[in-house]
Amino acid sequence: MPAPTVRLSTAEARRSIVIDSAIEVFARTGYLGTPIAAIAEHARISPAYVSKLFPNKEALFVAALDECFDRAGAALSRGADTGVDRSPDGILSAMGGAYADLIADRSLLMLQVHAQSAATVPEIGAALRRGIESITTLVRSRSGASDEAVQRFVAYGQLCHLIVTTGLDEVPAEWARLLTAGIRHP
Amino acid sequence: MPAPTVRLSTAEARRSIVIDSAIEVFARTGYLGTPIAAIAEHARISPAYVSKLFPNKEALFVAALDECFDRAGAALSRGADTGVDRSPDGILSAMGGAYADLIADRSLLMLQVHAQSAATVPEIGAALRRGIESITTLVRSRSGASDEAVQRFVAYGQLCHLIVTTGLDEVPAEWARLLTAGIRHP
DNA sequence: CATGTGAGTGACTGTACACTCACTCTCGGG
DNA sequence: CCCGAGAGTGAGTGTACAGTCACTCACATG
């Protein structure tokens, strides 16, 4: 009988699989809280090989974060196209809806929170700024909304982070409902 | 000559000194990124004694976080009293100003960010929710503003966290100025 | 001055983890 | 069929750190 022979793939393909795993696992346990071995296990690969694919843990985290912002940008872009109301505010709210759909699984959002916490690592801080920049300029240019409206968009996005990290949407209290009101829950 | 004899203090006094140190050091390097020894050094105390004063690192972090929210609450409360404009929105903006003054040194704010990142540790998540609750209800009751206005207050507070963690107020670019516009910078 | 209580520490232990290295295995090209 | 390049790993190494323990020392009280 044909034993399930091990098929090799290219390092490039492995890298992107590992990045997917990294997004998920880093999102759950944070930068310092995640051993490389946990990501390796999730990617069904040996820890040694992860270390061979990325020069160090920091670079792996940055790669995951970059990918995360790429996906967010793509989702926002799609959202900007799908709205019915073509006014700036209409587009903005369509983008908000698309973003809400995207972060339904929490990983992208949590990764951003962990990145903020680890932003004192220079490479991580830089990646975070890059990401915010691309989101901000994309929202600005695709919606055509005013600076104030874009700022508000980002501010409520951050509120969304707070709600998710603290599980506020599960808290059955008046103050919690006040904060989550009108926010699309995952 | 009188050798500088070692004066003992009470454990209670030490505890609060250690909490002060913990706020500062945890704020700089985060929960997992901070060794107990770093806090001990800042408090000019042995690591062993820190471990004797607090059952574990988690409890120390929670104590620091609680203290942090206490200070924030006190500052907001003071702000609510000092405003000239006694309308809800006037009081709200006075509270915002007081908060901005308080977080000039970034420690309180950074600690919150790190707490969000570590919120999967049950005790830390609970402390964070307690803190948010007390802030939210305080802002609500002292200002008398609408639910929407309070939600907006918190959302822009979170935007403030983003700005500080990423050092956006130092970034000389249009997109950065868009996000920081109108936010009181430290 | 004797003594008990509590402040404070040095040295240690166990563990977790990032990263390395020598090695094996796969498979495409000659 | 063979061989070399590259995929992939097991077993380690060094280090950092949380928490413990036996101990010393200060000082208030009688």
Image (tube, coloured by chain):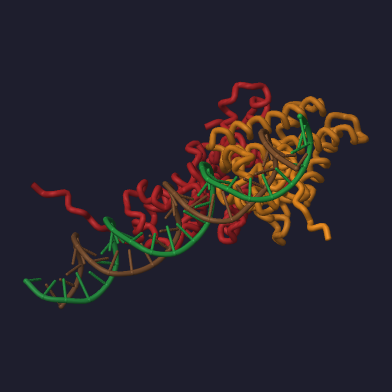
Chain colours: A orange, B red, C green, D brown
Residue B186 vertical position relative to residue B95 in the rendered view, above or below? above
Quadrant that contains the N terminus of chain A: bottom right
Residue B172 vertical position relative to residue B164 in the rendered view, above or below? above
Residue A155 vertical position relative to residue A133 in the rendered view, above or below? below
Label count reads 0
Residue sitting nearer the eye, A17 or C24:
C24
Residue shown at the point (60%, 39%) measured from the top left: B161
Say left or right for A87 vs A46: right
Say left or right for A144 vs A134: right
Q: Residue B103: x and y, percent? A: 51, 39
Residue sitting nearer the eye, A170 or B95:
A170
Q: Looking at the image, can residue B86 be seen?
A: no
Residue shown at the point (78%, 49%) measured from the top left: A104
Q: Looking at the image, can residue B99 be seen?
A: yes
Q: Residue D26: x and y, percent? A: 19, 60
Residue shown at the point (52%, 32%) measured from the top left: B186
Pick out the residue farthest to the right: A84
Q: Residue B176: x and y, percent? A: 64, 26
Residue sitting nearer the eye, B137 or B86:
B137
Say left or right for A29 vs B51: right
Residue sitting nearer the eye, B155 or A80:
A80
Q: Residue A114: x and y, percent? A: 61, 45
